[in-house]
Image: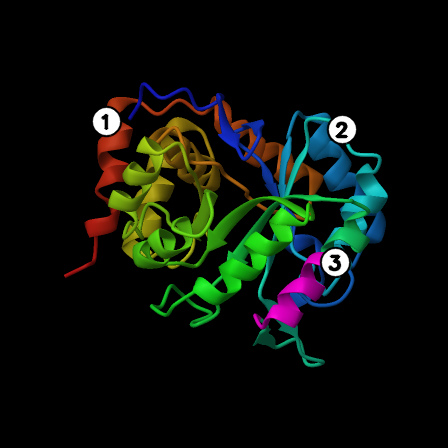
Amino acid sequence: MSRIDPSGTFTLGGRTVKRLGYGAMQLAGPGVFGPPKDHGAALAVLREAVASGVNHIDTSDFYGPHITNRLIREALAPYPDDLAIVTKISARRGEDGSWIPAFSPEELTQAVHDNLRNLGLEVLDVVNFRSMFSIHGPSEGSIEAPITVLAELQQKGLVRHIGLSNVTPAQIEEARRITPIVCVQNQYNLAHRADDALIDALARDGIAYVPFFPLGGFKPLQSSTLSSVAARLGATPMQVALAWLLRRSPNILLIPGTSSVAHLRENLAAAECTLPDDAIEELDSVASIGSA
């Protein structure tokens, strides 16, 4: 694990991207709903990310809704040639901010056009279909119909590559029988490692794995262990959690989000965080702490 280059690159669709990217979700208002508290600060974070070398941004038109995509366009268009913008579809937002499944053919098609319009693009680099059978985690159910719709939009030239989010291994295999899949975005971190075998299988096939919630769902003992390692290394718990993920597998691409330039810089510094073997051994044990 420690021999993997954390500052390296990986292929995402047709692009070579740096393994530490940026997730735009936190640029929207509270609950990922409504405008940001500080519009100028949101633009500054996006511009700082790209100026710092980030060339992979994760977004969705249901963030806001429409807010983050419009911010990305305002801050960064015309886009750098090497910038990969990855979006996701299959949900819409209620007037109360609720998350509503939206994966009929008409809703998926409209979502692609909404993303194109709000990002100011003629074709989307990567579109992730997010399974909405369960909002809080993967749940089995056929995704053949929505993936077929996306594949048709790809054939029409509106989408270059297709990815998946919040999915099971069976759903990944089902989708791959329909069209090539370039990335999978699921929850995975030090404490939640259900996708260990999946990550390794995807790595063998050259498919990117994009974990979200790098500190999500930790128990107190798990958090204290992470904090102890971080203090010993002179780093923040988030930096150590991100550094561990970068070293877990070469196909892991990170998209930590923030609405603060200072926090963005801290997150990006995780690529320079060196984890000695004893720290890696201690971090590897976090998942089993408190599991009994």
Question: Where is mark 2, residue-wise?
Answer: 80
Residue at disc 1, secondary structure: helix
The vertical placement of 96 against 141, above or below, is below
Q: Is residue 11 visible?
A: yes
Please name the residue shown 50% across and 39% down the image.
254
Question: Where is mark 3, residue-wise?
Answer: 113
Please name the residue shown 73% across and 55% down the image.
115
Q: Earlier in the sequence, mark 1 or mark 2?
A: 2
Mark 3 and mark 2: span between their CA atoms?
22 Å
Name the amino acid, label 3: His
Q: Position of residue 129 (x, y in %)?
A: 53, 57
User: How many neighbours does mark 1 have within 10 angstroms: few (below 14), some (14-19), or many (20 or more)?
Assistant: few
Q: Earlier in the sequence, mark 3 or mark 1?
A: 3
Q: Position of residue 151 (x, y in %)?
A: 55, 53
Q: Main secondary structure of the magenta part?
A: helix
> Which residue is more in the foreground, 178 or 96?
178
Quadrant of the rendered image containing residue 86: top right
Question: Where is mark 1, residue-wise?
Answer: 278
- Magenta stretch contains residue 176: no
For the record, the magenta segment spans 103-114
> Which residue is more in the foreground, 113 or 21?
113
Q: Earlier in the sequence, mark 3 or mark 2?
A: 2
Name the amino acid, label 1: Asp
